[in-house]
Amino acid sequence: MNKADLTKLLQAVRSGTIDVKSALDRLKNLPFEDIAYAHIDHHRHLRHGMPEVIYCEGKTLEQIVGITKRMLKAGSDVLATRANETVYRAIKKADCRAVYHKASRAIVVKHKEEKLTQGIVLVLTAGTSDIPVAEEAAVTAEMLGSAVQTVYDVGVAGIHRVLSKRDLLDAARVIIVAAGMDGALPSVVGGLVDKPVIAVPTSVGYGAGFQGLAPLLTMLNSCAAGIAVMNIDNGFGAGVLAHRINLLGEK
Amino acid sequence: MNKADLTKLLQAVRSGTIDVKSALDRLKNLPFEDIAYAHIDHHRHLRHGMPEVIYCEGKTLEQIVGITKRMLKAGSDVLATRANETVYRAIKKADCRAVYHKASRAIVVKHKEEKLTQGIVLVLTAGTSDIPVAEEAAVTAEMLGSAVQTVYDVGVAGIHRVLSKRDLLDAARVIIVAAGMDGALPSVVGGLVDKPVIAVPTSVGYGAGFQGLAPLLTMLNSCAAGIAVMNIDNGFGAGVLAHRINLLGEK
Amino acid sequence: MNKADLTKLLQAVRSGTIDVKSALDRLKNLPFEDIAYAHIDHHRHLRHGMPEVIYCEGKTLEQIVGITKRMLKAGSDVLATRANETVYRAIKKADCRAVYHKASRAIVVKHKEEKLTQGIVLVLTAGTSDIPVAEEAAVTAEMLGSAVQTVYDVGVAGIHRVLSKRDLLDAARVIIVAAGMDGALPSVVGGLVDKPVIAVPTSVGYGAGFQGLAPLLTMLNSCAAGIAVMNIDNGFGAGVLAHRINLLGEK
Amino acid sequence: MNKADLTKLLQAVRSGTIDVKSALDRLKNLPFEDIAYAHIDHHRHLRHGMPEVIYCEGKTLEQIVGITKRMLKAGSDVLATRANETVYRAIKKADCRAVYHKASRAIVVKHKEEKLTQGIVLVLTAGTSDIPVAEEAAVTAEMLGSAVQTVYDVGVAGIHRVLSKRDLLDAARVIIVAAGMDGALPSVVGGLVDKPVIAVPTSVGYGAGFQGLAPLLTMLNSCAAGIAVMNIDNGFGAGVLAHRINLLGEK
Amino acid sequence: MNKADLTKLLQAVRSGTIDVKSALDRLKNLPFEDIAYAHIDHHRHLRHGMPEVIYCEGKTLEQIVGITKRMLKAGSDVLATRANETVYRAIKKADCRAVYHKASRAIVVKHKEEKLTQGIVLVLTAGTSDIPVAEEAAVTAEMLGSAVQTVYDVGVAGIHRVLSKRDLLDAARVIIVAAGMDGALPSVVGGLVDKPVIAVPTSVGYGAGFQGLAPLLTMLNSCAAGIAVMNIDNGFGAGVLAHRINLLGEK
Amino acid sequence: MNKADLTKLLQAVRSGTIDVKSALDRLKNLPFEDIAYAHIDHHRHLRHGMPEVIYCEGKTLEQIVGITKRMLKAGSDVLATRANETVYRAIKKADCRAVYHKASRAIVVKHKEEKLTQGIVLVLTAGTSDIPVAEEAAVTAEMLGSAVQTVYDVGVAGIHRVLSKRDLLDAARVIIVAAGMDGALPSVVGGLVDKPVIAVPTSVGYGAGFQGLAPLLTMLNSCAAGIAVMNIDNGFGAGVLAHRINLLGEK
Amino acid sequence: MNKADLTKLLQAVRSGTIDVKSALDRLKNLPFEDIAYAHIDHHRHLRHGMPEVIYCEGKTLEQIVGITKRMLKAGSDVLATRANETVYRAIKKADCRAVYHKASRAIVVKHKEEKLTQGIVLVLTAGTSDIPVAEEAAVTAEMLGSAVQTVYDVGVAGIHRVLSKRDLLDAARVIIVAAGMDGALPSVVGGLVDKPVIAVPTSVGYGAGFQGLAPLLTMLNSCAAGIAVMNIDNGFGAGVLAHRINLLGEK
Amino acid sequence: MNKADLTKLLQAVRSGTIDVKSALDRLKNLPFEDIAYAHIDHHRHLRHGMPEVIYCEGKTLEQIVGITKRMLKAGSDVLATRANETVYRAIKKADCRAVYHKASRAIVVKHKEEKLTQGIVLVLTAGTSDIPVAEEAAVTAEMLGSAVQTVYDVGVAGIHRVLSKRDLLDAARVIIVAAGMDGALPSVVGGLVDKPVIAVPTSVGYGAGFQGLAPLLTMLNSCAAGIAVMNIDNGFGAGVLAHRINLLGEK
């Protein structure tokens, strides 16, 4: 319920088209749907620029499919993250347009294909093992409408690899960098460009990597100014932020 | 052995009904039962307002069933938490009144149904994945005698959802809020009401959520004053505390 | 702005006493005061059962005095925590009714003395060094209207000390336990009573006490069910929660 | 040395205007200045969109002043962060245009005032004590050329305060939220808007706040998607990122 | 090679019974056996009062059996800890005297039964789930020659349980206390007795118990003076220390 | 009140020498003294083998002196730890027998000198900087009645130093080892002897020593079996434990 | 592309043999191969003294085999670490020269055997369970060309074991020490020799060993000066560093 | 006492030049000096390649001067680290050759100047604030006899700075890299060279830098193989290791 709706409601109250008690009810009857195990936020696109997204871990199959159906029925596109093949088959059954992105474990159901942005979201990884997180970012940004380009395995131990991608760095509007282990790549990239850089630590590594804590701290302490840091393995969040920033440069 | 018992014993000593050595033995013979692997605290209800509860993890099936039988025989109701289906089947065999609450993994055996409180314990969750912890709280409070109401998936990323529940917040006597990830919901709820709020961090999340450490710290540092914090995933403790507080308002 | 106010406003809109645009403004014009460095929440007492409290650390003297004056002018009582003598002198100058509680570093300014509750908030400490935290809890609860009783230095290394206070434990409606080092006292107290117990870890200790982390973890993992845990050294929060619980038993 | 420079150099080599050895030297002779204790990166503005910034902690007064002078001489504006009054007086002596922002401890020396952006960077804080960090962000963004607006002390314990700022949230192009203690404000703001949100945890709080770790984790685990997180107290980084994002929407 | 051996060797050198080079070799040829994957310390009993013990985790079955055989052949008794049934069957095959203690996962092979000490090692647990750790301590101490007595499930939430064991506490020469969760029992026991108390934190618990970190910190910070703390779940170490202390009081 | 006292009381009740209510009072009237800020445990020596000890940090000068006076009046010896010169002067004024041990910051007041044990407590340090902690252990053990010997700066980086002390290691009944940095000395000592070894980590070190956490973990994970570990810098606790163990071997 | 190549290219540009645009392309066309999921750094041997190594965890079988084939084709030897039997069989199929080192889980494919160094890399372990990490170090150093010698299970709890290896310690040029639990062995070894010592903490241990954190901290805080520390379980890195150091002493 | 000494001693025993008891004493009388608060290891140079070094923190002025005098008297050079001006003045008084290196807080007293190595130890820092740690490394390596070269402030946010030092990187025999904040520089350097790289994390940074923990983890997890990591701020250790490695390449 946005400002326009509120004005209209108040005018209806004034003109007597609607009585006070009903208005009161309407003011409480906000645009979400209560299905016992979830309050689906159908209003989120208006307010937040994107639909609710289904994070599958910790939810039962029934809950995931139930939420998916309600969202599709309400006209919303669906993005389900951290989904395994079983979840995919169940959603596919509910809507045959469902697409499974295996590397990123994401499921996308779109009502129609839209035109992508002019601006490019460039997604880099330091290593091959960081690809699943990078793909989650790429799938998310693309599902929201951004043009995405990916370059993988250009970590700092072979610094010439990323330096050779100067053209792509220059062409992009916003850059996502996924890295595990030492998490040093965003600092180097951040020092090379004048555009927003989003760093995603991954849980790739072992021992004192502490499941991604090491690259997370590296990125938070980056000596390159203004790096945006996401939670460990949070490719989804990076995709959302990149898309929002990317949109600002359109038209 | 409470104060009355002690007075009575001392009077019996005085009147010579009981000799000194026997009295000494009685003073040692406190009201618990030693079955080698457990000292069942039959006295706990008197002292503590509720029976001992069986936390199943780390106990063998034999131990769980053994303790259950002794408690039932001693007239106590039984609550077994963190129980799987195997445990349930074994207890069901021992007493057919056993009920299994699947979402919360709790087993309840009651000798008779009692009237619930007038006051309501309201249980909220931030997300769908927090439901198991919330259900453990709900089952516990209800088993102890409290009327319970639940509202799930009203986290702060869609703040209008919890704001729309104002009536329920106002109607409850005590509120439990279970939340993982950022654990921010208790701070918002705590700022909206003038009644006790109990916050339960859940292990829902990933990466820098550190299995519930993140929402635990959030709740301990809540800018809303006086939030009671429980251990991660400790729905049981929240249910106990809520019931105790709830009882204070009865009659 | 509560439900009654909203109903009244809508009726005024209906009757034409107020036009739509003005109503819209009123709906936005919520009861706080913006003084650049603070949004003083004058409405908090209505909604939250107590006035805003001034946490002094990190605020300049000017800010503290400025907020105090606005609150007093708006008719609110004032509680300022973590205040040093300099702050006290400045507030005293602004309002001579100001009282400084040295042990707890709290300042209280009350417009008039109110009658205290029948129910008693009992505040225990494990050691002498925990007294400042306990006093913060006591001052807070009393300032809000609760009758408070204190018993200090009854930690578990001399278990007979707390056992000898059985009468006080039985007489209280809610119990606050402040403890540093091993933080074991709340577990013992929690096992002795059937009423709400609030545990406050203190930063008393050294080495692997990690400035209060040790007793915090002890309390979160208490084997006595349903202990409410507060942040380290958060006597203030314990006082607020205790008072809210205490109020439920009045009348 | 950008692509154009490299092309020109190669053409000079081809035409014989420059010999191979000299070209080789030029390729090594990159645009920084070595003054023993620092390699000042005069090239940074071209490559990175902003000049090098002087982080004062851990540097001697001589070093700070030395770097400042070289930068000014090279035509660069200067931003020195975490500077105390002594540093300010020394820089003021070197260049009387120096301005000290006391709350944020930042020094700015600008060669000339430039026109600010149309787009607005909105800076919010949860509490009064978070203002120094917010001010560092504001000073930084403004020094780089962004129009900045600030709203302080609108934390979630009084949720109506931030809800009442809906107009400002809607009007801004990018939002910075600084919060200590529970760090919950960015999650609420992030759920209300469809634009980039930058969260800065502050070290405000005590006990289990662990000098800003608690709000840092809260923000990394935000249930609102796509929040950009900065290091604890890193207002500077937030200002840089906000400005870069803001620039994308200009023209 | 002890002092007596060294004296003898030097005298042999002097008397010419042994030449210098051979003596040199002997001085190097210390009493352990190198079997490629292990240097079995046959000398340990002399020096250390007990044979080497086989910690099974991280060792292959072949390695465990190989070491066992060498030790038995050298006349040493064998204690293998953290052993599963497969290991037991393999050792049983090598020596039919092998006994498997299931609760503690320990295997014992003794050449002959020896008389136990007069002094008693008393082993307590706070809960039923702590029994495996307590049993490891009990098996170890007994295998080394101590008389052992066990009392389980007497945690502080029912303080009367441990208080009722006063006689056993008084009768023991040294006391081991195993506790998980809040780890508070050793503090209470330590305050009741004037003899050495050994505290073993267990990994029993969940959430902020952090796999035994919580009770470990509790015990290190015990307000009862002089508690000896062991590693988490280290029943074996507790058994060794208890036996050594116990031996001091014999005769 | 021990068993004998209880028997006597019950007999008095039986014989009518004392009435029931008085007996009840006596049972509550346990042997400690309540002086508002402390419950002095005069009974502790009987129960615990040593008087209460005053840990000075976090206590006011008034509190320390007050407790000291009460203890001395009740005939108890006094040990005050972590005391500075100011505290010493105040106690000295109260009782001129007070002795200040500067290196360990401990104050001792004894009513009369007692004969020390035959058995020796040997106190080792790895480095010179560990001496204050070692001295606290030495002063404590000696004050309680143990003969103490000290050997300092024999850490493992010069392994021959500790190996050369073989005679002292053999002559002692119990050994305390204080070590900071890598904390490796107790493992070496523990492997050389067959007697109880008490390890005290010190906060000596820097960086990843984390104020004593590194040596604490080293000692808890010692590959020498049965090392007793104390809190960081807890020389006092080590002295108490050593004395208790030492006593077992007397006569 | 090294300095010689660059000079040659520039000369070709000068002489007109190559036009500017092609030279520009060549400067970008650096010596790695992009196969979508990896940028194989064929140049690494020249620059870095060794080929890229395949860390198998987090990579799919297809990716591992794909990278292996490209490397072999480019003439490089292959080392794949953390590889299971399935990976081995797949690589064996691709090249029958593949050798699987089971204990260390490493796969080596060499084009031809080379002569090993004169200098010896000595690899020690504290216990038997540390062997897999030590073997990874040994296999790596040997694959790169170093002569390697191993001595296992000589931890400090039996200090005479390592002291008896004095000859080997003296004969080696560089020493690797792998140790879990207390991680004390490198400190002792480091104090005995005047050559580089590389310490590798292993995840061997339990409880407060925290998966290798304890020995890692021990090694970082070693009282023996100049110990080189590697990540937990990083035998590979130790092998690389040892080989590089070893090479310096050749010829 | 090395092997030659031992052989000689045994021969003396054989020839009767020395009796058995005296020989026994000699074997115990190892080459250190016991001055109560320290066991000075005069033998260390022989065994360890360098004299003992005095770490000043936690030592009294008397102790530092005492140890210094004994070492000088025994003919050893002296290096005292973490020394303030007061310590310097006291040592200067004892020996006027003392030199104070202010940036690194190190004091050096040399008996005579020796020729430096041919091989160069190159010391890099990421920033200006890392210089004190780098200087400690440089002073240490030089004092031991290595030729040292320093290049400061070449961190990865301006990657061209370190790339431009290619000549120096190529010319050095071993490289030390000191870096705080993100600690990324060693990974880049490690990928550029084929020689040993020693990484020293510094405590430079704030917030989630956690006093050097962040760069420490970065370096331990470096994606460049074989980086040697030191404790936080341990420039001294880096200098020792670098010198030892450097020596291997001499002649």
Image: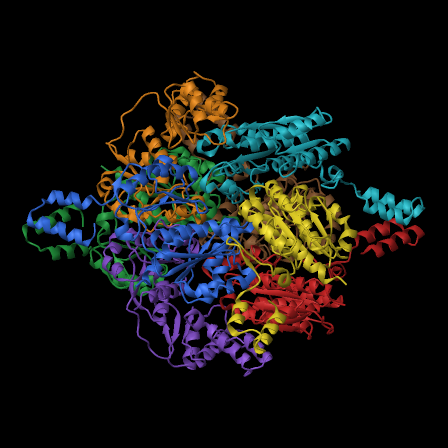
Chain colours: A blue, B orange, C green, D purple, E cyan, F brown, G yellow, H red
Q: In this view, does G160 lie above or below B34?
A: below
Quadrant of residue B46 within the rendered picture: top left
Quadrant of residue C174 within the rendered picture: top left
Choose between B201 and A128: the one closer to the eye.
A128
Query: Is residue B80 visible to the viewer in this orientation of the structure?
Result: yes
Image mark count: 0
Which quarter of the rendering shows the C terminus of chain E?
top right
Question: Which residue sits furthest bottom?
Answer: D17
Give percent across and percent down for residue F246.
Answer: 65, 40
Choose between D204 and F19: the one closer to the eye.
D204
Q: Is residue F154 above or below residue H65?
A: above
Give percent across and percent down for residue G47.
Answer: 62, 63
Query: Is residue F110 visible to the viewer in this orientation of the structure?
Result: no
Give percent across and percent down for residue F139.
Answer: 61, 50
Q: Left or right: F18 with respect to G21?
A: left
Question: Which residue sits furthest front?
Answer: G17
Which quarter of the rendering shows the N terminus of chain E?
top right
Question: Which residue sits furthest top?
Answer: B17
Q: Is residue C172 above or below residue B74?
A: below
Choose between A36 and F223: the one closer to the eye.
A36
Q: Left or right: B100 with respect to E186?
A: left
